[in-house]
Image (tube, grey):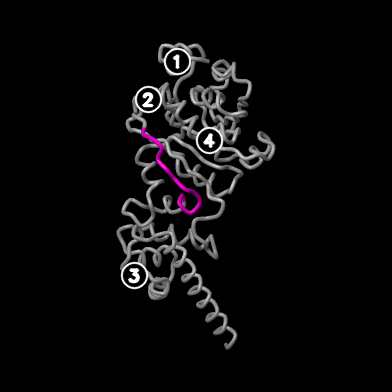
Amino acid sequence: MQGLSDLRVIRPLLEKYGFRFSKALGQNFLVDGSVCPKIASLCGAAETGNVLEIGPGIGVLTYELARKAQRVAAVELDRRLFPLLSETLSDCPNVRLIEGDAMKMDLRALLSEQFGGERAVVCANLPYYITSPLIMRLLEERLPVDAVTVMVQKEAAERLCTEPGTRASGAVSAAVRYFSEPEILFRVGRGSFYPSPKVDSAVIRLRLLEKPAVFVEDEGMFFRVVRAAFAQRRKTAVNSVSNTLGMRKEAVREAFLAAGISENARAESLRLEDFAALGAALQRERNGAENETESAECHR
């Protein structure tokens, strides 16, 4: 359906179906006619041929994706939108609408069902409250996905794409760099949405890596260390890790030194390679402590 970026078309359409925006779902529909074609071109829809869209809204982006891809599976949580979407996407036979919560669905099974085992790209205009949890789920589950292209709040985009070892970095930016190559594609003003949010947005693309950016022996420990280091940002990383993981400060300090990291370093100064080395050193410290405890118990 043409004209979905024109409020003179959108408002009567919403009125026709009695739709009211939900603040709880963070609904701000993208209505800028110049933005959606750009996203559809940059997300890899034409190259991969298969797109999983999360949160189609009224179908503005979905329509553009359908023009590029062979198949589009659009997952929408709000069932009130389905009658409206049936009209706006009536001339897009390659779009399949699926009701569900992307945070709770079996995404691997969904991708297999919709695309028959072929790889896909993910595209979404995400509500701000779900940005980090959903992106981390898409990355951590190692789905057959080549790239994730999402519209997020501008500050979130900068945080997600920043380089570890810089002042703005955090646990989520380290995790994103571990799994992917992130890039801010372009910024989008608040006036591009209906209703207009109070903040500007940006479109980011995460190209998933075939293997993680750094080698780690224990991925679980690696991410525990990353989260622990950033848990108390005002403290040194040694204190933050010690307090959060419940390990003796001296043992943590020794692990930092063994990993070649200053005991006075703060989390934002650490690179992925530092976290990998630190995770391995802490695991050795923990294993050594456990062995000493077992030995002591055997000699009682």
Mark 4 residue type: Gly
Which residue is found at the position 44% from the left and 23% from the top? 21
Label 4, label 1: how far apart the Cα atoms are: 28 Å
Q: Mark 1 points at which residue?
A: 10
Where residue 262 is drawn, which disc sits there?
Answer: 3
Q: Mark 2 points at which residue?
A: 192
Label 2, label 4: how far apart the Cα atoms are: 22 Å
Most common secondary structure along the magenta stretch:
strand
- Drawn side of residue 29 relative to residue 137, left or right: left
Question: Which structural element holds mark 1?
Answer: helix
Residue 129 % position (x, y)? 43, 38
CB under 8 Å between callouts 4 and 3? no
Q: Which of marks 4 and 3 is nearer the N terminus?
A: 4
Neighbor class of circle 3 (other Cα within 10 Å; few <14, some 14-19, many 20+) is some
Q: Which of marks 4 and 1 is nearer the N terminus?
A: 1
Q: Mark 4 points at which residue?
A: 44
Residue sitting nearer the eye, 77 or 67: 67
Is residue 29 shown in magenta?
no
- Drawn side of residue 100 relative to residue 6, left or right: right
Mark 2 residue type: Ser
CB under 8 Å between callouts 4 and 1? no
Q: Give the range drawn in magenta.
A: 176-187
Query: Of circles 1 and 2, which is in front?
Result: 2
Question: Which structural element holds mark 3?
Answer: loop
Question: Which structural element holds mark 2?
Answer: helix
Q: Is residue 178 above or below residue 39?
A: below
Which residue is found at the position 57% from the left and 21% from the top? 82
Q: Earlier in the sequence, mark 2 or mark 4?
A: 4
Mark 1 residue type: Ile
